């Protein structure tokens, strides 16, 4: 009997507990139901309170396309400059080249008073010619049995000695002549006619303008995308574009700027690009995906970054800093966005990051 009573009492307690819980639920706040049409999407604003809602905003749907991408750097043209020195002391008696003249490698720029060096060179040239002629005859006669092998060896020795004498005479003469070390422009002459110069005195400076070098600095992130030998487009201030290649990428960053030096070599056969010319250097960094947009879509956010406002998840305005990878007459190509993005159309200056809006999307391409 006590066992049956215990079972009855337990059942009564269980029923009371269930009734109490239901009364609490029905008397408290109801649990909200989540419906499919309240889930935020890229095309719907999140329903809610009207506070912070920016109203209707027009967007342009943009899709990324395969595109050769370019890394843009600002640079300046530089050139190899070589001071030309005298190899001897003496009085300047020859100045055959004017400043600004294009000279070939080996061209005489300045000469010192002669000490018979020119005559010695001519004499050595004559001696060498006669020695070679004699040796050639001896070789011919040896084949006919007219002379011995010893005589041929002697004539060959005479040729070798004449060659050495000619080189010595030329070397002595060259010390008294300052010549161009390479093809370039005789930019500045420092020696004057009649001046006595010491050993190592400077005649002038020759500048190599072809090819010309453009130098720029790349950040660590940018340097990782640059390879030596990559094609380059150099845009000059007058609008011209010239082609070149990456000649060198520094392995060590500048301790002050933390940038890596990039050198670009550009043909300059007519010497039309001078030293010190600023330019935009566009380095080919390979194929990737980018969006073509109009320049008007590029905006600055509160932090001063240049980028694009777009429709983020939940109908909220987002901002993506844009990397410009190319520019064409049809617009600019940017990366940093999803492959399929909805961009805030031009003519809506009041949009800002975090603002909830009701989007109106049109399908026309952002770039035109």
Image: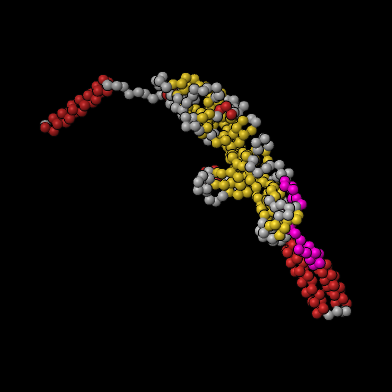
- In the rendered image, residue 126, in percent from the top left (x then y), is placed at 83, 67
Residue drawn where x is 59% and y is 25% of the image: 364
Q: Is residue 237 left or right of residue 161?
A: left
- In the rendered image, residue 219, in percent from the top left (x then y), is placed at 53, 43
Q: Nearer the viewer, residue 354 or 141?
A: 141
Is residue 126 located in the magenta-colored stretch of the structure? no
Quadrant of the rendered image containing residue 24: top left
Residue drawn where x is 47% and y is 29% of the image: 302
Is residue 97 located in the magenta-colored stretch of the structure? yes
Is residue 16 among the parts visible in the rendering?
A: yes
User: Where, quadrant-wise, is the C terminus in this rendering?
Assistant: top right
Give the answer, above or below, for where 172 lies relative to 225: below
Is residue 245 among the parts visible in the rendering?
A: no
Q: Which residues are magenta?
A: 96-124
Quadrant of the rendered image containing residue 196: bottom right
Q: Is residue 233 left or right of residue 163?
A: left
Q: Is residue 8 left or right of residue 215?
A: left
Q: Nearer the viewer, residue 139 or 173?
A: 173
- In the rendered image, residue 138, in percent from the top left (x then y), is placed at 85, 75
Residue drawn where x is 67% and y is 54% of the image: 202
Q: Nearer the viewer, residue 29 or 206?
A: 206
- In the rendered image, residue 355, in percent from the top left (x then y), is placed at 45, 25
User: Where, quadrant-wise, is the N terminus in this rendering?
Assistant: top left
Total labels drawn: 0
Residue drawn where x is 54% and y is 47% of the image: 260
Q: Going by the picture, which residue comes out furthest to the left?
A: 2
């Amino acid at each position: 009997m006590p066992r049956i009573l215990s079972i009855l009492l337990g059942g009564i307690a269980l029923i009371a507990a269930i009734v109490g819980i239901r009364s609490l639920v029905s008397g408290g706040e109801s649990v909200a139901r989540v419906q499919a049409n309240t889930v935020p999407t890229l095309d719907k604003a999140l329903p809610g309170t009207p506070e912070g809602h920016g109203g209707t905003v027009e967007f342009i749907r943009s899709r990324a396309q395969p595109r050769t991408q370019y890394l843009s750097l600002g640079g300046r043209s530089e050139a190899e400059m070589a001071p030309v020195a005298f190899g001897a002391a003496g009085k300047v008696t020859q100045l055959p080249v004017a400043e600004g003249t294009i000279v070939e490698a080996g061209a005489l720029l300045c000469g010192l008073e002669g000490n018979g060096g020119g005559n010695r060179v001519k004499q050595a040239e004559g001696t060498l010619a006669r020695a070679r002629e004699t040796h050639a005859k001896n070789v011919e006669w040896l084949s006919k049995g007219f002379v011995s092998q010893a005589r041929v060896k002697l004539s060959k020795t005479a040729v070798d000695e004449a060659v050495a004498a000619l080189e010595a005479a030329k070397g002595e003469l060259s010390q008294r002549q300052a010549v161009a070390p390479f093809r370039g422009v005789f930019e500045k002459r420092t020696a004057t006619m009649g001046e006595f110069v010491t050993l190592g005195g400077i005649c002038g400076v020759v500048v190599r303008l072809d090819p010309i070098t453009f130098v720029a600095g790349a950040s660590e992130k940018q340097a990782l995308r640059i390879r030596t030998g990559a094609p380059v487009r150099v845009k000059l201030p007058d609008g011209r574009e010239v082609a070149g290649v990456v000649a060198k990428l520094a392995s060590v960053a500048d301790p002050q700027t933390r940038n890596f030096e990039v050198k670009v070599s550009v043909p300059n056969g007519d010497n039309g690009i001078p030293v010190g010319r600023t330019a935009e250097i566009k380095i080919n960094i390979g194929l990737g995906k980018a969006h073509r947009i109009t320049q008007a879509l590029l905006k600055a956010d509160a932090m001063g970054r240049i980028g694009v406002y777009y429709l983020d998840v939940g109908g909220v305005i987002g901002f993506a800093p844009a990397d410009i990878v190319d520019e064409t007459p049809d617009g600019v190509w940017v990366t940093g966005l999803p492959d399929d993005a909805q961009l805030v159309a031009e003519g809506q200056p009041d949009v800002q990051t975090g603002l909830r809006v009701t989007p109106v999307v049109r399908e026309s391409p952002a770039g035109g």
